[in-house]
Amino acid sequence: MPTYNFPYYNTVDQIYHAEWSIAKLARHELLRRSIATLWPNGHPTRLIHIAGTGGKGSTCRFLEMGFSSIGKAASFMSPHLFDYRERFSIDGEFVSQDDIMAAWENRVRPHCVQLATDQPANIHTFHEASILIALSLFEQHGVDWAALETGVGGRYDQTRALDVAATALTNVGSDHAHMLGDELWQRALDKAGIARPGVPFFTTDADPTTLEIVGQVCAATGAPLYPVDAAAIAELEVQLARHTLNPTPDSLLHADYQKRNAALALAVIRHLAPAIDEGAVLRAFANARLLGRFWKVEENVYADIAHNAEKIEALSGEIRRQFDERGKILVVGISGQRISTKVFRALADIAQTIIVTSASFKGQDPARVREEVKGIVGDIPVLVAFEPQQALRTARSLQRNGEVIILTGSTYMIEQALNPDPYLRYMSAHFGWRQQEPHEATGVIQLNLPKPAPPLR
């Protein structure tokens, strides 16, 4: 049997793409310097770093709620659904708009402006500024524990610049292949890159290839590895029953697939706080809620931000379990470069009617998506509505007694369909417009994006 050296493959990949990888790693160094400047004695909050294709936000919420039984706990998640402040949660509640304004205007913006004044190439990105806002909010509110999810991938995401007490990987799926690699092993290698020397690494991914890669990366890094297997998930279910905890329909644990994320969070909590009252943790888990996760919008209308093939597959199983023989009208929007056929293959078995619409951010053309999936969905009617609110109106007009409407496929589509704030809805739909301003002299559209920071010495 040949021996494969995955940490070496990462090294070769970095060398092959040196201009790209050095620029990414320089962003990490820039963020580390900003954190050291703002918190010269180190940040007071103990952080847990979460990566994975699906379940990052839910795992963060379980960690937040679990740790809140012994202190103040928080999480930093992305993307948000309706309001930017939803990215920051403390003891299960989103921070206030005033909190966001104060953190940005009094702490983060002055630092970022000074940094750019000293060195114009060192302009922090949206993601980096958001991380600094999260850290500022955690300090302001006296947070003891906080979970943070990666934006994309792991090794090169800016959250990798943070010093953390533990890392956790939910799973490795097909999402963001255009950024992380077409092959599963490439994506696993990227996500395993959240490993730090001496920092415990937990994962619920049971794929043998992924576990081999994670094991090699952890061994090379010096990170203790703790797999969370099916037995741990079964044990969690037993413990929930023993404490007679019956999650309500609006709680995360009402969905069976969330038990895997809860088991991962419980393993991390047990390791970092072994004296914690597990009964209190499980009660907190049973009460954990998160906007956009199998969310009951109104009677017979639900929304779930599942936005890749793996999440859609899990959601489809849950829809089948909860609604059984009831008719199901699905409103689906696809964003980014996700492969529509993979998403619709999971939906074809449960849908009575599918309405394809667009998403405000990197939305795919619904008419083209409809043509792509014709051969997958068989005789299921597939309608096209180019605007999400129009799609929801169409679904309601088709709805009969007992039928359920489910919006899914893109956070950005659900936001445009349901956001009650017209101003935030407009801002979300036009995110990034200032980066395409006409040049004042020529009138030519130019992308005014900051250049990657050079390697810092």
Image: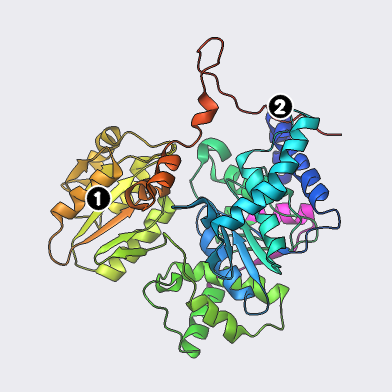
- The foreground one among 123 and 208 is 123
The quadrant of the picture occupied by the C terminus is top right
Name the amino acid type tagged 1: Leu
| Residue 131 in sight from this viewpoint | no
Residue 69 lies, in percent from the top left, at 62, 79
Please say if 244 is above or below 434.
below
- Dot 1 falls on a residue whose secondary structure is helix
Name the amino acid type tagged 2: Glu
Residue located 71% across and 27% down the image: 19
Q: CA distance from mark 1 to mark 2?
A: 45 Å
Q: Which mark is residue 317?
A: none
> Horizontally, is 72 left or right of 366 in the view?
right
Residue 80 lies, in percent from the top left, at 49, 52
The residue carrying pointer 1 sits among few (fewer than 14), some (14 to 19) or many (20 or more) residues within 10 Å by Cα, namely many
Please say if 177 is above or below 309.
above
Please say if 295 is above or below 277.
above
- Dot 2 falls on a residue whose secondary structure is helix
> Horizontally, is 448 left or right of 424 in the view?
right
Circle 2 is placed at which residue position? 19
Q: Which mark is residue 392?
A: 1
Residue 427 lies, in percent from the top left, at 45, 40
| Range shown magenta | 212-230
The image quarter containing residue 365 is top left
Residue located 64% across and 69% down the image: 73
Residue located 37% across and 63% down the image: 294
The answer to which of marks 1 and 2 sits earlier in the sequence is 2
The residue carrying pointer 2 sits among few (fewer than 14), some (14 to 19) or many (20 or more) residues within 10 Å by Cα, namely few
Residue 277 lies, in percent from the top left, at 64, 85
